[in-house]
Image (cartoon, coloured by chain):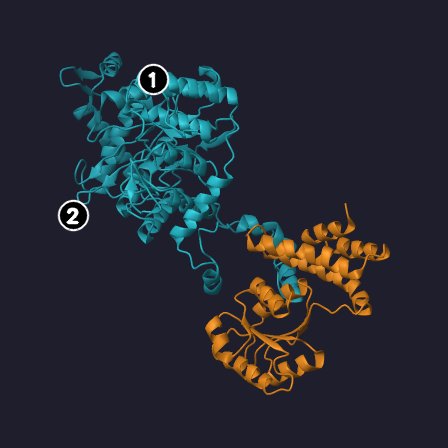
Chain colours: A cyan, B orange
Amino acid sequence: MRPTVKFLNNELIEKIISEARELLCVLGAEIHNDTILSMLADHGAKINCGKKHAFFTQDIIDKSLSTVPHSFKLYDVLGNETHHFHDYNVHFTPGSAAITILDYKTQKIAKPSTIDYVNYAKVINQLTNIASQSTALIPADVPENISDSYRLYLSLMLCEKPVVTGAFTIEAFAIMKELQIAVRGSEKALAEKPLAIFSCCPTSPLKWSDVTSQNVIDCARHSIPVEFISMPLSGFMAPVTLVGTLISHTAETLSGIVISQLSHPGTPVLYGGSPAIFDMRYETTPMGAIETMMIDCAYNEIGKYFGFPTQGYISLSDAKLLDAQAGCESSMGAMLAALAGINNISGPGMLDFESCQSLEKLVLDNEICGMVLRMIKGIESREDFPALPLFEELLKEKHLLIAKHTRKFLRTEHYFPGTVIDRANRARWESEGATTLWERAHQNVLRLLKQYTPSALPDSVKKDLTDLMQQEARRYGMNTLPEGCL
Amino acid sequence: MNILTQISENLQKGNDELVEALTQEAIAKNLPPKDILDHGLIAGMNIISDQFKAHEIFLPDVLLAAKAMYAGMNVLKPLLIKDKIPSRGKVVMGTVQGDLHDIGKNLVSIMLQGAGYEIIDLGNDVSPEQFIEAAKTENANIIGMSALLTTTMPVMKKVVALLKEQASAGAIKTVVGGAPVNREFAQEIGADAYGFDAANAVEIVNKLSGH
């Protein structure tokens, strides 16, 4: 039996949805994009052009909800299926778009450079419990206008996993789409086998900037999957109660669904988010707060109530170093998210309020994900009945270490984490250097970097990607891509 | 493929029947028993030991290999004795008096056997006198003692003290292990070595035996 967790009953879910729909119809949403306002008007929404405000109708909400796919798949750069977003399937992906990286030697944060991104891509390519890569760092050694496309370029060149990404500008979408088409061969092939998911974030409360809303419709037009990342803050930009925050999240996410589905019905979307409580003592948005995680799991239940695949920014920490808080918050989040069946769980590697990536933490989180993935397989009977013969064997042989039953089920019943998790007895641990988790994680990072083998993407495709990226860099005054980029 | 390599590889796979047959075949081909032992059986076990330490394989794989080693050794043993090739060593094993927990001791015994040692297993609840007597009678060079209870640990001290009073003092080494036992305790009671797990016990016994 697959274990699950639930925070809401259907009655409460229906009430939350009903209130959210009313917000959209009565209060409306601010949308700074004339194309979208015009499209909404064409479908019967009342528009206040001067205030860039749209008042939704129950009809357009219903119409949009009816065309959202209830599942979709993702494929790696080589075209192999890696994800099936549906039901209670869960996949992990690293936390995305960190503006800093935690340096192992100095234990201080630094702005990421190309080499950091390259190392990240090499490591994530080999972490078996994290199904996709995200464009997890924003390289600071390229012009800002290409920092989004450049990270996608590096990801596609170095790592075979599909990508969770996003565009920072309207203009960047074009090159980011072209890079994906270069991998797949054609726009049609890309639509058939999606390679990336774009994160699109409304602003709380109920606002869409020109850039993010345009990204939604650009993705829709090219059948590129989108994950909506609504970020209400309990007590600040949303009611302090968890239910009130869920109403806010639901309204914002439904507004995204309407924009996407009216632009191109059937566009795959993930019902996602990154809400948080607001810590009134520190003026921060703790992703490691238990209430933040509860909101995540609960909106995922609302998404599932609609029948849509879901996403959540959970399984990350607000700690500044790879310490006990980092492990505690990341583990709690990963476990709750998996139990709740959040289909795309974003967070591994991330520290410090979604601002800092750590390769060492990524390695640790990969083990947390492994344990959690084992947990959700649940407890199943595996040739356990009748029990008598096995216990007779035990009494006869005095142990079951080499029993057929042991050998058959050992590696599936028990998850064996890598060396970052210490399971040696104290004497062995001491004899092996009495290492800290931080040191063992770093040793693993070094090992992964050393044993990395290049992506099997054909050289001709890699050349096309590089030509496209160089052309884009030149547009923004960068004649050659940073050294060490490959 | 060289027959010794075949023995080594099949031992690593835990194929005891084939290792036994190949050892017989190697003997039939007049290969020196010492070569079969060193370059076939022990060579295979050394690889297994390295893979186990690197977490590439798990305990069941080691024990299966050990079983295969044992099967080969059974065939080889009469010839090794005939050629007066000294055995790898003889170890008296037991859980100390007052203690009935023998899981750890059994695991160490299996691993040592797999490494080519002859094991005299005295079981559990073994008195100091029984350890000494068995070591002398069997001409063993090592006594391995295990305890799970802190209350039975002092028996280890008695064995070490009693051994020092013997004429053969120094010839028989002592190794201690078990959950509450640690290196400091081993030093305190004057034991020759402490093994923190079964694989480590093999390394230590190898060292004490000069292998």
Q: Position of residue A335 (x, y in %)?
A: 38, 46
Viewer-nearest of labels 2 and 1?
Answer: 1
Quarter of the image where the C terminus of chain A is located: top left
Determine which residue is flagged by label 1: A474
Residue type of the residue flagged with mark 1: Arg
Is residue A411 rendered to the left or right of residue A96?
right
In the image, residue B193 sits, relative to residue A185, either above or below, namely: below
The image quadrant that residue B23 belongs to is bottom right
Where residue A102 appears, as percent x and y from the top left, is 32, 43
Spatial CA distance of label 2 from label 1 is: 46 Å
Q: Between residues B135 and A129, which one lies in front from this camera angle?
A: B135
Q: Chain of mark 2?
A: A
Q: Answer few, some or many: residues within 10 Å of disc 1's Cα (few below 14, many 20 plus, some between 14 and 19).
A: few
Q: Horizontally, is B211 left or right of B7 in the view?
A: left
Where does label 2 land, which residue? A281
**Three-letter amino acid code at the position of disc 2:** Arg
Let me know if marks 2 and 1 both belong to one chain. Answer: yes
Locate residue A444, reporting x and y percent. Answer: 45, 46
Question: What element does badge 2 sit on?
Answer: loop
Between A45 and A280, the one nearer to me in the picture: A280
Secondary structure of the residue carrying tag 1 is helix
Q: Of the numbered discs in the image, which one, if any, rests on residue A399? A: none
Mark toward the start of the polypeptide (2 vs 1): 2
Where residue A337 sits, quadrant-wise, is top left
Task: Name the residue rendered at 45%, 58% in the picture.
Answer: A433
Position of residue A246 measured from the top left corner of the image (x, y, whole percent): 25, 37
* Residue at screen point 76% across, 58% down: B35
